[in-house]
Amino acid sequence: MLLTPGALVRDHTVYSCVMGSRAFGLATEASDTDRRGVFLAPTPLFWGFDKPPAHVEGPADEQFSWELERFCELALRANPNILECLHSPLVEHIDATGRELLSLREAFLSRAVHRTFTRYALGQRRKLTADVALRGAPRWKHAMHLLRLMASCRDLLRTGELVIDAGDAREPLLAVRRGEVTWAEIERWMSRLAGETEEAADRTPLPPEPDTARVADFLFRTRRESALRPGPYGEAVRRVGGGGGGGQA
């Protein structure tokens, strides 16, 4: 029996946090509260033809969650949005599985972040440039967030640690959001960050590859514990795998 997406998020979330401007230290009174989470679908749900969803949008506004395995897959691929979720300073819910997930944060990091963050930044920069061509100005909020992301990537490559809070750059970035910085200045700022990122990539302390084996072990143990957990799904496991007269003829 499949649980509804809403029930998976409500009853099986292992980690949830606030992201966006509030997590980046760039919130204003008008900022939304973007919530992101990770849920662990009970293992027996994967044994039928209908699998649980890899992600769920909602049930609340501005809420999005991933099933644990999909979240780990994306994190191992150095997806910028996923990696930043693991480093939010605004944690709203966490259980033992979620705490172990956070303890693996460094296992997901590798030099692949240079490629994935840069590729994402280039895509966003093209969109901003198109806005300027069409409208005469970029979307200032998007420009602010792009600059923050680029600085975060540069510092990650320099130090091996991902920090998503804007820190001392908060006021200059908010000036960008208010449209107080010209597009020409923003372009120079982005070009400088891009150059510093390339320099940092040449001597980064990050490992060449993520620690996939460590993450795989965590996922295997978590799936196994879920399968054996007492309750309706654990009972189904015991019925399927129980002893008695089920031997070979």
Image (cartoon, grey):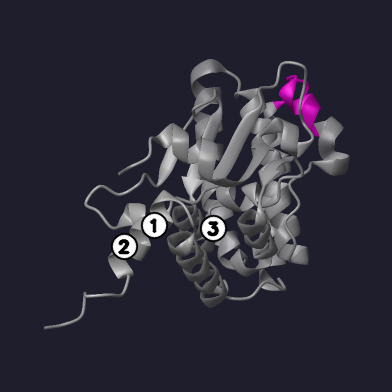
Q: Quadrant of residue 196?
A: bottom right
Task: Determine the residue positioned at 36% across, 64% down.
Answer: 238
Binning the other alpha carbons within 10 Å of mark 1 as few (below 14), some (14 to 19) or many (20 upward) gives some
What secondary structure is found at the residue carrying circle 3? helix
Mark 1–mark 2 Cα distance, whole angstroms, equals 6 Å
Mark 2–mark 3 Cα distance, whole angstroms, equals 35 Å
Pointer 3 residue? 75
Pointer 2 residue? 239
Depth check: 179 or 30 in front? 30
Q: Quadrant of the N terminus?
A: top left
Whole-percent x, y for residue 147 in the image: 69, 40
On residue 248, which mark appears? none
Name which residue type carries label 3: Ala
Pointer 1 residue? 235
Mark 3–mark 1 Cα distance, whole angstroms, equals 32 Å
Q: Quadrant of residue 154?
A: bottom right
- From the image, state whether disc 3 or disc 1 is nearer to you: 1
Binning the other alpha carbons within 10 Å of mark 2 as few (below 14), some (14 to 19) or many (20 upward) gives few
What secondary structure is found at the residue carrying circle 2? helix
Whole-percent x, y for residue 153 in the image: 68, 54
Name which residue type carries label 1: Glu
Depth check: 74 or 7 in front? 7
Q: Quadrant of residue 102?
A: bottom right
Task: Determine the residue positioned at 11% across, 83% down.
Answer: 249
Give the residue furthest to the left: 249
- The residue range painted magenta reads 173-182
Q: Is residue 101 visible?
A: yes
